[in-house]
Amino acid sequence: MDLVSLVERIGEAPTAALFGLITGITFGVAAQRSRFCLRAATVEFARGRMEDKVAVWLLTFSTALVWVQAAQLMGLMNGADARMMAVPGSWSGAIIGGLMFGAGMVLARGCSGRLLVLAATGNLRSVVSGLIFAVVAQMSLSGLLSPLRDKLAALWITEGGRNMNLLTTFGLPEYGGLVLGLICAVFALVLARRHRIGAARLVFASGVGFAVALGWVLTYALSQVAFEPVQIESATFTGPSAHTLMFFLDRNAVLEFDVGLVPGVFIGAMIAAALAGEMKIQAFDGPVTMRKAMIGAALMGFGGMLAGGCAIGAGVTGGSIFVGTAWAALFFMWVGAMATDFLIDQRTASARAA
């Protein structure tokens, strides 16, 4: 069945949700098996090490660049049509939101995408944190916190009515993104070999990057045949978590890519964990851990919405099409995470050791 026939049979919105589900399942399986986590990579780096967690994150990021940029060169998608590129971006949002999100993911012991994956394996801490994240994200999108988000985002925006395309800004050729991705992938593989990361984990790490490209390609293809405008998008968890929450609370909510993505990640991660025998009920270690996780989830909910995306949405999905504010948000997520680890986790560990 071709895409036109599929759309005619089930409709545009259900097709978008189906594509979200497919992207989500692919992401969930790959993320669970590779143990991909930006928080783990930043903490490892902050403590002066570049080992398996940094290697896995870098391989995911680089393969996303490779898959997405190759798809663009082949005409399978066009990043310029993506919403995050076609509308003005916020530098102030990327800086402030990135710092907040980075701090939050260290406190919550996982970024929003990682929390969703862990929740699927029976981690109750991640279930609670994920719900708080989704509620605060919705409040930041159109609720009590939205005026503050709008005010902070408006402090410094990109010029020209669009976001900044870093490849164009720096005068790089069309294949420049692909070359950069390949260089980063080689470096990641060198790190992986040095720390003896198994081939299966590397394949799944690259699978996370592939899932990002898959989302871009599927939504772009749908936009070419749909009668109504279709948002070209891929894996991200700030907006989709809020939209999915409202879908189950509002009878007037409609199906869309986001509504398929979040359940898809949960299903994929659950299947992967069950097949590997890694399903296990886990709770909070104590009240201190609970408070940190709840505060961290709230920071991620507001910070991710302000930054224009989470560690996946801005850090990998937006980064893969070289959105200027997405790269800025990713940088400040690293800064916020490393500072929080140094000021809180490392100092706490040192005090206990003393």
Image (spheres, rainbow, N blue to C red):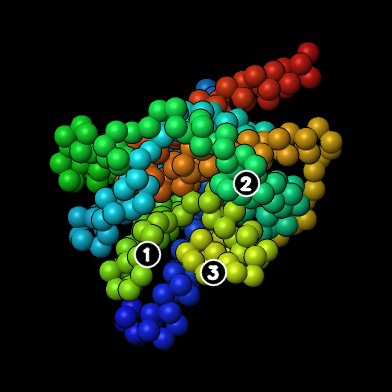
Q: Is residue 28 above or below residue 163?
A: below
Foreground disc of the pair 1, 2:
2
Q: Is residue 137 above or below residue 213?
A: above
Which residue position holds label 3? 254
User: For the residue marked with disc 1, what is the amino acid?
Assistant: Val
Q: Quadrant of residue 40?
A: top right
Left or right position of 53 against 118: left
User: Disc 2 on helix, strand or loop?
Assistant: loop
Residue most extreme to the right: 287
Q: Residue 310 appears at what percent x and percent y?
A: 51, 43
User: Disc 1 on helix, strand or loop?
Assistant: loop
Q: Residue 140 appears at what percent x and percent y?
A: 59, 43
Residue drawn at (38%, 80%), measured in percent from left and top? 7
- Mark 3, other Cα within 10 Å: few <14 / some 14–19 / many ≥20: some
Q: First in sequence, mark 2 or 3: give its number.
A: 2
Alpha carbon of mark 1 to alpha carbon of mark 2: how far? 25 Å
Alpha carbon of mark 2 to alpha carbon of mark 3: how far? 19 Å
Which residue position holds label 1? 230
Left or right position of 227 against 334: left
Residue drawn at (48%, 44%), measured in percent from left and top? 309
User: For the residue marked with disc 3, what is the amino acid?
Assistant: Val
Q: First in sequence, mark 3 or 1: give its number.
A: 1
Could one spot residue 15 in this view of the protein?
Answer: yes
Alpha carbon of mark 3 to alpha carbon of mark 1: how far? 13 Å
User: Disc 3 on helix, strand or loop?
Assistant: loop
Which residue position holds label 2? 143
- Mark 2, other Cα within 10 Å: few <14 / some 14–19 / many ≥20: few
Of residues 144 and 170, which is closer to you in this image? 144
Foreground disc of the pair 2, 3:
2
Q: Quadrant of residue 349?
A: top right
Q: Quadrant of the C terminus?
A: top right
User: For the residue marked with disc 2, what is the amino acid?
Assistant: Gly
